[in-house]
């Protein structure tokens, strides 16, 4: 059971469990700005429970998809006499926060006795940074796939130019026309050209 | 008419076969349902995504459905189990080293399948280690509210060991169990199929007990839904139960095991080779020990004698385990039993004509 209730003047101890250094850095930076907090990041999961007990945090932040969450659930064992986080969210009636958090893919385990107004900014910051990281990653993936598509289109153009003895613009116009006729993306048509060329070569 | 869509989360385990076959073989389509399956790796995540509405239904540990309803863990959300996803399927596996230590301390002529004999030998190993000042063995189980936790505790307790003092019980999600044994984080574990067989196949584990050695008819997973979803969509829930019960009956037929194993083997389902899954369905398990294999026609039961029908006595036994190990207050047994919604099952597929077994569990300690 709680041996000491966190007070307003003591910095909050936050443990961040995240194997992604980039996301962890984004989150740490945000948390430092919002709160006078002592943040410890745990990136590997060896002896996780012992390390958390040693740190004795007020808040634990962990990705929803992280398999170590099941390990954390051991902390709720009723017979344990140590001080422990009690709930995933400080206020289970605050469904908007909970939904935002689950949608962002993050969970927060919060110790008993911590006041709602101290947790809210942490949770809000965590959610917004997790979302920002997801957007960043989605943009990166989109950029990557656009690059891949452009490469395929270039290869298809080269194949058409050689086999039909036409110029680059004509080759592109041909891909575009077929794509429009077949209601497909240019990259898809280009991929079929490349595949076909590989088969016939 | 377009089909009603249902999202179901599952953990890669053989007992997820019921919702997986309902989706992949066509039983859901027969009920006008389209099941979208989501493969998850942690029980906490499945529970949360069910509780907060990302999933309509989930393949969930029966005790976790109860503990979430009672608010014993990190979140409280009223759940219901309109059907059980079969019974049994667990095993206890030890590292070859620990297995050999245990076998060397077995009483002469003792039966390796007798949990009392193996428990006594294991207790002797634990005492011998303590006498040398060595660390106690760490055993993996899947979740604080799991039958794996309770089966290990049943075995240890019967051998006079205190599970919270004499050994370490560590939570490891099922798909990580084999890695944890390989890395030496645990020296043994209790987990569901096919992960024991995967450890045997890799030569890093030996199966000591099939779950049925400890509990003949052990509750395991349930199809869990939010009670609020039941209130909103009772008719869809009924169709879902019907589709899943048909899938369970199909799975129980030996003629379908090959197809089931192959469907489960693919990467977005269990991602484990089909022959390993097949042997768990057959109940013929190479154990990697002195005897070539263990055979049980009850190793995993889908629906031979209406095992899918929720038996509130199972819920009460699970609750008794929670109480026994300090997880639940004594007075919540009725609320636990109420999670098992036999009424919904009977409304969907009809009540079975067969009389119920007098002893719902068949504990080795009975």
Image (cartoon, coloured by chain):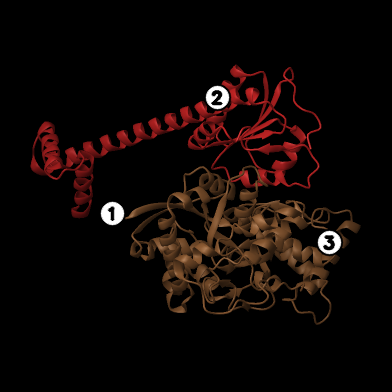
The percent position of residue B32, horizontal first and vertical second, equals: 33, 60
**Alpha-carbon span between mark 2 and mark 3:** 46 Å
- C-alpha span from label 1 to label 2: 41 Å
**Chain for mark 1?**
B
Whether residue B323 sits left or right of residue A36 in the image: it is: right
| Subunit of label 3 | B
For mark 2, give the secondary structure.
helix
Q: Which residue is under mark 3?
A: B161
**Which residue is nearer to you in this view: A42 or B89?**
B89
Viewer-proximal residue among A102 and B277: A102
Which label number is shown at residue B2?
1
Q: Which chain is red?
A: A
**Chain represented in brown:** B
Residue nearest the viewer, comparing B351 with B89? B351
Which numbered circle lies on residue A125? 2
Q: Which quadrant holds residue A16?
A: top right
Residue B143 versus residue B22 in the image, above or below: above
Is B284 located above or below residue A136 in the figure? below
B123, A118: nearer the viewer:
A118
Q: Earlier in the sequence, mark 3 or mark 1?
A: 1
Question: Quarter of the image containing the N terminus of chain B?
Answer: bottom left
């Amino acid at each position: 059971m709680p041996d000491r209730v966190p007070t307003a003047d003591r910095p909050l101890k936050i443990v961040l469990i995240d194997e992604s250094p980039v996301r962890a850095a984004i989150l740490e930076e945000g948390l430092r700005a919002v709160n006078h907090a002592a943040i410890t990041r745990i990136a590997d999961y060896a002896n996780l429970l012992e390390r958390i007990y040693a740190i004795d945090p007020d808040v634990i932040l962990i990705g929803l998809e992280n398999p170590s969450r099941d390990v954390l659930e051991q902390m709720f064992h009723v017979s344990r006499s140590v001080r422990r986080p009690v709930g995933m969210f400080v206020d289970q009636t605050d469904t908007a926060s909970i939904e935002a958090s689950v949608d962002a893919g993050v969970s927060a385990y919060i110790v008993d006795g911590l006041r709602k107004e101290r947790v809210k900014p942490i949770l809000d910051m965590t959610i917004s940074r997790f979302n920002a990281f997801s957007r960043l990653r989605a943009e990166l993936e989109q950029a990557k796939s656009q690059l891949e598509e452009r490469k395929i289109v270039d290869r298809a153009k080269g194949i058409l130019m050689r086999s039909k003895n036409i110029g680059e613009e004509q080759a592109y116009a041909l891909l575009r026309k077929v794509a429009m006729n077949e209601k497909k993306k240019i990259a898809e048509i280009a991929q079929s050209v490349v595949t076909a060329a590989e088969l016939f070569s | 008419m377009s089909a009603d869509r249902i999202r179901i989360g599952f953990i890669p385990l053989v007992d997820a076969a019921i919702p997986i076959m309902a989706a992949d073989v066509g039983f859901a389509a027969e009920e006008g349902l389209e099941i979208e399956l989501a493969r998850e790796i942690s029980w906490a995540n499945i529970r949360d995504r069910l509780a907060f509405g990302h999933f309509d239904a989930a393949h969930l540990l029966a005790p976790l459905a109860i503990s979430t309803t009672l608010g014993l863990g990190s979140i409280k959300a009223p759940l219901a189990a309109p059907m059980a996803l079969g019974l049994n399927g667990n095993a206890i596996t030890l590292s070859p080293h620990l297995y050999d230590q245990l076998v060397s301390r077995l009483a002469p002529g003792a039966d390796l399948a007798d949990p009392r004999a193996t428990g006594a030998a294991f207790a002797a190993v634990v005492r011998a280690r303590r006498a040398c000042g060595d660390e106690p063995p760490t055993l993996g189980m899947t979740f604080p509210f799991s039958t794996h936790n309770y089966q290990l505790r049943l075995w240890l307790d019967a051998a006079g060991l205190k599970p919270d003092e004499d050994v370490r019980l560590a939570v490891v999600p099922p798909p990580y169990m084999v890695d944890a044994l390989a890395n030496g984080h645990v020296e043994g574990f209790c987990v569901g199929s096919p992960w024991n067989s995967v450890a045997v196949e890799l030569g890093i584990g030996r199966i000591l007990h099939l779950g049925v050695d400890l509990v003949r008819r052990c509750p395991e997973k349930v199809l869990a839904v939010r009670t609020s979803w039941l209130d909103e969509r009772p008719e869809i829930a009924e169709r879902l139960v019907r589709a899943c019960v048909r899938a369970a009956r199909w799975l129980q037929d030996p003629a379908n095991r090959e197809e089931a194993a192959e469907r489960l083997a693919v990467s977005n389902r269990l991602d484990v080779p089909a022959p390993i899954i097949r042997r768990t369905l057959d109940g013929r398990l190479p154990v990697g020990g002195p005897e070539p294999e263990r055979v049980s026609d009850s190793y995993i039961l889908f629906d031979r004698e209406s095992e899918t029908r929720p038996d509130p006595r199972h819920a009460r036994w699970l609750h008794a385990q929670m109480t026994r190990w300090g997880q639940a207050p004594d007075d919540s047994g009725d609320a636990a039993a109420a999670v098992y919604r036999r009424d919904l099952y009977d409304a969907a597929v009809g009540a079975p004509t067969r009389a119920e077994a007098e002893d719902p569990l068949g504990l080795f300690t009975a």
